[in-house]
Image (cartoon, coloured by chain):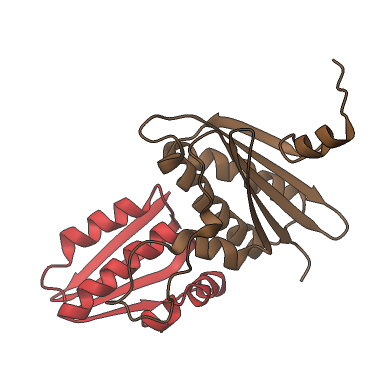
Chain colours: A brown, B red
Amino acid sequence: MTHIFGSSESREQSLVLPAANAAKLELEASVEALPQVLAFLEEQLEQADCPMKLQMQISIAAEEIYVNIAHYAYAPQTGMATVEVETSAEPRSVTIRFIDGGKPFDPTGKADPDVTLSADEREIGGLGIFMTKKIMDDVVYEYRDGKNILTLKKRLDA
Amino acid sequence: MLNINKTQENTALTVALGGRLDTTTAPQLEKELRASMEGITALTLDMAELEYISSAGLRVLLSAQKTMNRQGEMTLIHVNETIQEIFEVTGFSDILTIK
């Protein structure tokens, strides 16, 4: 197999193609498969010696994004999702990338819920992406070649 | 996996939670609470064994809090540090009564 990248092409594709050391999970995006996604993620985080507390926070963020894809990306049909996890040593960080070929949707464009409201005034929705943005250091959305690509990054050192 | 353990004394209900309260398990808790909250004036959620909560779990807590605002009190006990931090990030620490 030969890959020839022109300079402009490689830059375009580098965001879509997995990095060399990224672990990758491809599956049909369904809510039922959430435990499989989280198990895959947690395995990668454990290998990177990610502290327990951060593991839970990162899992929460990943759950929010994955469940969104499972619920909405291909509705009412279903389709495939790809989850990539890449850890880097210096500085210690983890990058998680969610890719789907569903309807274009930028979750980062959603307004934050008002977290100062009382329980009765609070609405049930809108929390997921807000939690994700609070937990992760970077949340970047791109739409490229018919794919939604959401990249989450978290530094592992305090 | 979510464990739900209910004990009731008159109109006081204590629900002990263990394991994970996420997208796949939150509907279980929602169902259990809906079935047992009628006439309850004091609802205590014991979070000692709860390891994980996502926004789906938070939604169930918010909905329970709204119900209890109309009929009594809801209190969370034994909230661990990690979950407490999630409550703080989301503003839930101001909505919920955490002891």
Q: Is residue B35 above or below residue A46?
A: below
Relative to the observer, which residue lies in front, A158 or A132? Answer: A132
| Image location of residue A106, percent across then percent down | 53, 51
| Image location of residue A39, percent across then percent down | 59, 43
Left-right relation of A119 to A66: left
Which quarter of the figure is the C terminus of chain A placed in? bottom right
Q: Residue at x 40, y 47 (%)?
A: B24
Asked if residue B97 shows in the view, the reply is yes
Q: Is residue A148 above or below residue A158?
A: above
Relative to the observer, which residue lies in front, A76 or A145? Answer: A145
In the rendered image, the residue lying farthest to the top is: A1
Q: Residue at x 56, y 70 (%)?
A: B82
Asked if residue B98 shows in the view, the reply is no
In the rendered image, the residue lying farthest to the left is: B39
| Image location of residue B34, percent across then percent down | 19, 60
Q: Residue at x 42, y 69 (%)?
A: B47
Quadrant assignment, res A1 = top right
In the rendered image, the residue lying farthest to the front is: A8
Total residue callouts: 0
Q: Is residue B66 above or below residue A153?
A: below
Relative to the observer, which residue lies in front, A30 or B43? Answer: A30
Relative to the observer, which residue lies in front, A41 or A2? Answer: A2
| Image location of residue A112, percent across then percent down | 48, 68
Q: Is residue A31 above or below residue B60?
A: above
Left-right relation of A127 to A54: left
